[in-house]
Image (tube, helix red, strand yellow):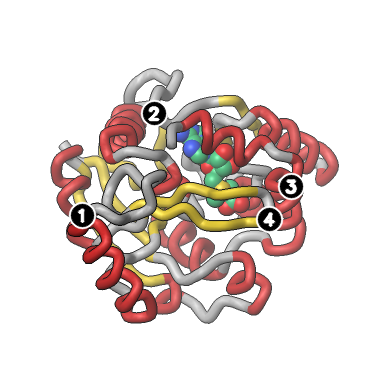
């Protein structure tokens, strides 16, 4: 599994339609709004990585954040995000870009978002670290980066992970998986990659990259999301981190 396979999944018309529906019908989650309005000022220059069809960027624009740029490594998503923004009469900018090799100068953005577990859809730990380093490089000192992940420690999935650990110990795990914690979820559009980390794993990674953890909190602790949000996306964990000197 590599970035190309993930890109192939998100380029498929079914996936593009799914994220377009999300941008139009689901919109910004209550939890996202609570976090973003707490840490970002309306004048901030913001970058959204993995913007898909623009669900988060559009939601932020509607809250008054107009200095927004959304990037995604999937051309089809960018086309759709631009189309929606134009249709709504918003002045949002969307551009093709890969989070592991950001084409921006250092210290450019006041804040950065990589929502809906997008960072964990980058296969291989070394590539996720590369993306985090890039995000830190283009973030201004004192700026916040917000991302979400699943949480391997959640009780709901405890039995699965006990069994999965056994499978890896015995070497009988799904041969398509490269690292422990990786999952390939079935969807109508094929298998989609997701790495499911532990809290410790992300804390260690943040330390290694040099981000300071400001807060980590489960989505359900932030807001009671309406059914359309819970149907679209499972429980997740918010990570609010800061670039300090
Ligand atoms: C789960 S979707 C989320 C889309 C959108 N943010 C939303 O919440 O509706 C993840 C998005 O991240 C993008 N993505 C994955 N890896 C990426 C990378 N390395 N660089 C840029 N975008 C990436 C995918 O193309 C996809 O559009």
Q: Earlier in the sequence, mark 1 or mark 2?
A: 2
How crowded is the residue under tag 1: few (<14 C-alpha within 10 Å), some, or many (20+)?
few
Question: In the drawing, does residue 242 fall left or right of residue 207?
Answer: right
Look at the numbered disc 3 and say if its residue's Cβ is closer than 8 Å to ligand 1.
Answer: no
Identify the image quadrant of the N terminus. top left
Please give the label number shown on residue 107: none
Q: Nearer the viewer, mark 4 or mark 1?
A: 4
Mark 1 secondary-structure assignment = helix
Task: Look at the numbered disc 2 and give the secondary structure of its residue.
Answer: loop
Q: Which of the 4 image quadrants contains residue 233?
A: bottom right
Callout 4: few (<14), some (14-19), or many (20+) C-alpha neighbours within 10 Å? few
Q: Is residue 56 visible?
A: no
| Coordinates of residue 121 in the picture (x, y in percent) | 45, 45
Residue 188: assigned label:
4
Ligand 1 within 8 Å of disc 2? The answer is: yes
Q: Quadrant location of ligand 1?
A: top right
Residue, disc 3: 14
Identify the mark nearer the N-term, 3 or 1. 3
Say which residue label 2 marks: 100
């Amino acid at each position: 599994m590599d970035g190309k396979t993930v890109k192939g999944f998100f380029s498929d018309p079914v996936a593009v339609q799914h994220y377009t529906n999300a941008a139009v019908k689901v919109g910004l989650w209550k939890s996202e709004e609570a976090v973003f309005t707490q840490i970002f000022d309306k004048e901030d220059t913001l970058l959204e990585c993995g913007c898909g069809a623009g669900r988060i960027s559009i939601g932020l624009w509607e809250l008054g954040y107009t200095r927004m740029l959304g990037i995604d490594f999937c051309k089809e998503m960018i086309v759709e995000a631009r189309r929606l923004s134009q249709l709504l009469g918003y002045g949002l900018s969307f551009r093709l870009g890969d989070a592991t090799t950001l084409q921006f100068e250092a210290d450019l953005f006041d804040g950065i978002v990589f929502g809906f577990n997008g960072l964990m859809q980058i296969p291989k730990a070394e590539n996720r670290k590369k993306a985090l380093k890039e995000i830190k490089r283009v973030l201004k000192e004192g700026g916040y980066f917000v991302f979400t992940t699943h949480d391997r420690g959640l009780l709901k999935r405890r039995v699965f992970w006990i069994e999965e650990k056994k499978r890896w110990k015995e070497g009988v795990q799904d041969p398509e998986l490269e690292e422990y914690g990786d999952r390939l979820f079935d969807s109508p559009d094929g298998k989609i990659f997701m790495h499911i980390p532990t809290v410790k794993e992300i804390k260690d990674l943040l330390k290694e990259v040099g981000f300071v953890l400001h807060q980590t909190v489960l989505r359900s602790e932030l807001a009671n999301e309406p059914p359309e949000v819970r149907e679209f996306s499972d429980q997740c964990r918010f990570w609010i981190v800061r670039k300090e000197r």
